[in-house]
Amino acid sequence: MQAALAHPPRERLHGLDAVRAIALLLGLVVHASMAWIPGAQYFWVVSDASPGEFAGLLFYVPHMFRMLLFFLVAGLFARMACERLGSLGFMRDRARRIAIPLASLWFPMLMAIVAVIAWNAWLVNNGSMPPAPPTPPLSPRNFPLTHLWFLYVLLLCYIAALIVRVTLGRSAFAQHVADTAVRVLASPVGPLLLALPLAAALITHPKWFAWFGIPTPDQSLYPSLAACVAFGSAFGFGWLLHRQQALLQRWAAHWPLHLSIAISATVGCLLHVGLAPKLVPTTREIADIAYAIAYAVAAWSWTFAIVGLGLRFLSGHSPLRRYLADASYWIYIAHLPLVMALQVAMSRVEWPWFAEFALVLVATLAILLPSYDLLVRNTWIGAWINGRRKPRGLEAAR
């Protein structure tokens, strides 16, 4: 087998780039599926008249792992950038690529989402607007970060990593302990060890809705304990993995094992909760505790498996994959209002759910990919999110 990490330290790690893009683009699949999940009227802006139980799978399975996967790779790339740029250079780089996009794009995204919600309400009420529901005042505890919450949590992770770097970074003992722990966690038993604190955080989370998995911190500036444990541990693990990148070769070699465990644990979870969401908070009975453990094991096993698959099969240079990896950040930032608007449009027709879902997905990419090439890639926006302006077109990614 070809070595998974046969790249010089400063060369682009194409396999991990592809994995990060997969994690972001799976967000489109998750959000695009939500209008067709049975009971969507209770948790989503659009509830289509032609729901399908199997639409739940398109949400449930990717949602298990996509953000764990993203934060793991983000942590690894973050330390790589910090080593290359130094702490001050890293802070400037992350301010430009993460903090500025969050500060400048959050409000336009929120307003676009509100406009789609208003449009759907107008259609549902036959051309008249219903009374606006009461909304609590904006505060740190009530702050609709929308789907851009991941940028906010990334900033918190960067701050925490830099604090630890300054306080413990020069301690030989701390480095030895961290490297030993990472070697254990990167072994085949790693998903189980990583799953235990996540499962504990999930089962103790107030009003945990088990079918929806890890609660995303999208409504407050104070992330829940479950979100901190899930995404913080993934980021920290990725950060420390960068010190021993050769460990990832294990994942490239053992991806069939991790994938088998992921699928088995996912099937077990679905047998417990079903294909459609149950909008009742989970109890702390034995069956629910077992579900939380199985869910966390599945989430981490999927993460190990997909990283391994990416390193095993996607480590070669591909202009198309590189271009999509560059575009995935913009696509994820811009996709949600567009997906919602297309779902509202699809709610006015009576087609099979899978045809409507596919059309939403294809139309979203057909709009956002050209918008990236025309409006982002070689503009000041591209300089923000990609680190520099890049020549337009697929050929430029060679």
Image: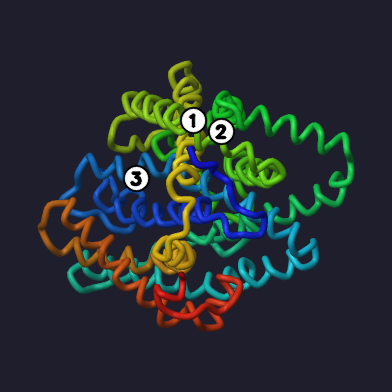
Query: Is disc 1 surrounded by few (<14), some (14 to 19) or many (20+) residues within 10 Å?
Result: some
Check whether the beta carbons of the residues at disc 1 and disc 2 lie within 8 A of each other.
Answer: yes
Residue 2 lies, with reference to residue 121, above or below; the image says above
Instruction: Name the amino acid, label 2.
Output: Arg
Foreground pick, 291 / 134: 291
Question: Residue 173 in the image: x percent, y percent?
Answer: 87, 34
Q: Which mark is residue 254?
A: 1
Question: Residue 47 in the image: x percent, y percent?
Answer: 25, 54
Which residue is at 37% across, 30% downward?
A: 263
Question: How far apart, in angstroms, are the residues tagged by discs 1 and 2?
Answer: 6 Å
Which of the two discs, 3 and 1, sits closer to the camera?
A: 1
Question: How far apart, in angstroms, are the residues tagged by discs 2 and 3?
Answer: 29 Å
Question: Residue 218 in the image: x percent, y percent?
Answer: 52, 54
Which residue is at 56% across, 82% downward?
A: 380
**Quadrant in the rendering for residue 126:** bottom left
Residue 59 relative to residue 47: left or right: right
Residue 43 relative to residue 355: left or right: right
Mark 3 lies on a secondary structure that is helix
Residue pointed to by mark 3: 59
Query: Is disc 2 surrounded by few (<14), some (14 to 19) or many (20+) residues within 10 Å?
Result: some
Which of the two discs, 2 and 3, sits closer to the camera?
A: 2
- Of the image marks 3 and 1, the number of the one nearer the N terminus: 3
Instruction: Name the amino acid, label 1.
Output: His
Mark 1 lies on a secondary structure that is helix
Which residue is at 39% across, 27% downward?
A: 260
